[in-house]
């Protein structure tokens, strides 16, 4: 991490390597959560099937947790990190 001073404000520049490390760790977390989700979903489907089928109640778990996993993946991986340019653009919008 590199710190730069410009006037009264201190700007923190995140090292690219640190940012890449965070993205890799986020991908690993998502992957492990996905594996757990698939395994638990399979167990629930097997229990449902052994119970004689009928109303597919594991669908509630699969649907709700699946949506939560997608949202988590979006926030962890697909969303770009906040930059100083984003903050500056927001400040310019506020001053108009």
Image: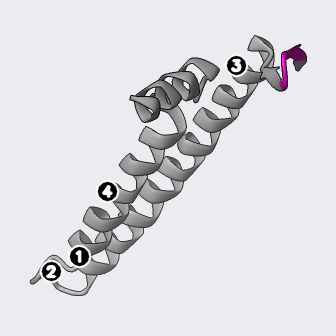
Question: Taking the image as drawn, is residue 79 in sight?
Answer: no
Nearer the viewer's eye, disc 4 or disc 2? 4
Please state which of residues 79 and 48 is positioned toward the viewer in this rendering: 79
| SS under mark 1 | helix
Measure the C-alpha gap from mark 4 to mark 2.
Answer: 24 Å
Question: Which of the numbered marks, if any, corresponds to residue 49?
Answer: 1
Is residue 52 positioned above or below 12 on the image? below
| Residue that mark 2 sits on | 53
The residue at the point 69 percent across, 34 percent down is 25
Sequence-wise, the earlier of marks 1 and 4 is: 1
The furthest residue to the left: 54
Is residue 45 positioned above or below 23 on the image? below
**Residues at badges 4 and 2 in contact (C-beta under 8 Å)?**
no
The residue at the point 58 percent across, 33 percent down is 27
The residue at the point 24 percent across, 87 percent down is 51
Residue 85: x percent and y percent? 57, 18
Nearer the viewer's eye, disc 2 or disc 3? 3
Measure the C-alpha gap from mark 3 to mark 1.
Answer: 43 Å
**Residues at badges 1 and 2 in contact (C-beta under 8 Å)?**
yes
Please state which of residues 61 and 11 is positioned toward the viewer in this rendering: 11
**Residues at badges 3 and 1 in contact (C-beta under 8 Å)?**
no
Please state which of residues 5 and 20 is positioned toward the viewer in this rendering: 5
| Residue that mark 4 sits on | 67
Is residue 49 positioned above or below 2 on the image? below
> In the figure, residue 8 lies in which quadrant?
top right
Is residue 6 positioned above or below 24 on the image? above
Q: Residues within 10 Å of mark 1 (few under 14, many from 20)?
A: few
| Residue that mark 3 sits on | 20
Nearer the viewer's eye, disc 3 or disc 1? 3
Please state which of residues 6 and 64 is positioned toward the viewer in this rendering: 6
Residue 7: x percent and y percent? 84, 17
């Amino acid at each position: 991490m590199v710190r730069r001073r410009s006037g009264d404000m201190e700007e923190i520049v995140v090292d690219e390597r640190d940012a890449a490390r965070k993205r890799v760790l986020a991908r690993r977390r998502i992957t492990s959560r996905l594996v757990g989700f698939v395994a638990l979903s399979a167990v629930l489907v097997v229990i449902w099937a052994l119970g004689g089928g009928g109303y597919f109640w594991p669908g509630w778990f699969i649907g709700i947790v699946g949506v939560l996993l997608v949202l988590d993946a979006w926030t962890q991986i697909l969303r770009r990190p906040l930059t100083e340019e984003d903050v500056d653009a927001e400040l310019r919008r506020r001053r108009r």
